[in-house]
Amino acid sequence: IMGSAPTLANILSHNPELLDAVLYQDFYSALPTQANLETQLKEKLQQVEYFEDYMDNLRQFRNEKQFQAGVHLLKGMVNSKQTGQFLAVLAEIMLRQTLSAVLAEFQKTYGEISGSRFAIIALGKLGSCEMTFSSDIDLVFIYDTPSFEAYSDGEKSFTASVYYNRLSQRLLNALSAMGRDGRLYEVDTRLRPSGKQGILAVSKQALINYFEEAAWTFEYMAFTKARAIAGDES
């Protein structure tokens, strides 16, 4: 590994404990399916109480599974397409678990907005299930609400726009925060309407209006890879 795979060597130099994973009985078995990954992760998180410990466990799990996929690719046990699909499934699971944890913490203070929905749309290599070991993840945050005048019912109350933009920022912080095992993912949100000048979370109607009135050709092209992967996917 150290002599023939610089990327894996670099990962090991920062996380030498990953070599322990090689000793697992199933390390050289077929890469786990989505259902198996979710089961393994559920067992790992079973006794975790605090948010920071929860995120540390997610980072550890993600590093272990990426490392396993890298060794399988190095040994020719899987091809690049299979690896890309596995890394995308792993990223989806990490996103769903992170959103679940962030939302639970967020709602303690800000409550909920009745009847509203929030989802994460994946674009780029995550959207097309062609991820590499160095891929960032391209995300768009979208929400829908019966009334834009409605307020959340928490101790601190916000309208939908403020509520979901603050939630999205919390989620971004959790995904990209540097922990002892590195960060979960580098996140790129520049493919949202109006790019860096636009607000972080957009309403469903605003997204529709943008594509009907103002979107550039490259934005239409980017959205050919769009997939809803977390939250209220409906």
Image: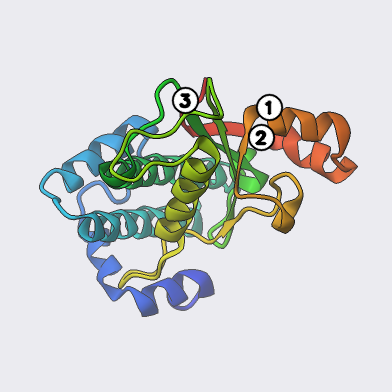
The residues bearing labels 1 and 2 have C-alpha atoms spaced at a distance of 17 Å
Residue 45, percent across and down?
Answer: 19, 46
Instruction: Please name the residue shown 36% across and 47% down the image.
Output: 98
What percent of the width, then of the height, locates residue 104? 28, 41
Does label 1 or label 3 sit earlier along the sequence?
3
Residue occupied by mark 2? 226
Of 77 and 198, nearer the camera is 198
The residue sitting at 33% across, 70% down in the picture is 179
Task: Please name the amino acid that badge 1 sits on.
Answer: Gln
Q: Residues within 10 Å of mark 2 (few under 14, many from 20)?
A: some
- The Cα–Cα distance between marks 2 and 3, rounded to whole angstroms, is 21 Å
Residue to which mark 1 is pinned = 205
| The N terminus: image quadrant | bottom left
Residue at numbered disc 3: 116
Mark 3 is on which residue type?
A: Ser
First in sequence, mark 2 or 3: give its number: 3
Tag 3 secondary structure: loop
Looking at the image, is 146 positioned above or below residue 125? above
Cα–Cα span, label 1 and label 3: 13 Å
Specify the quadrant of the image occupied by residue 81: top right
Give the mark nearer the N terminus: 1 vs 2: 1
Instruction: Pinpoint residue 33: horizontal percent, then vertical percent.
Output: 38, 34
Residue 203 higher or lower than 28, as above or below: above
Q: Mark 1: few, some, or many residues within 10 Å (few <14, many ≥20)?
A: few
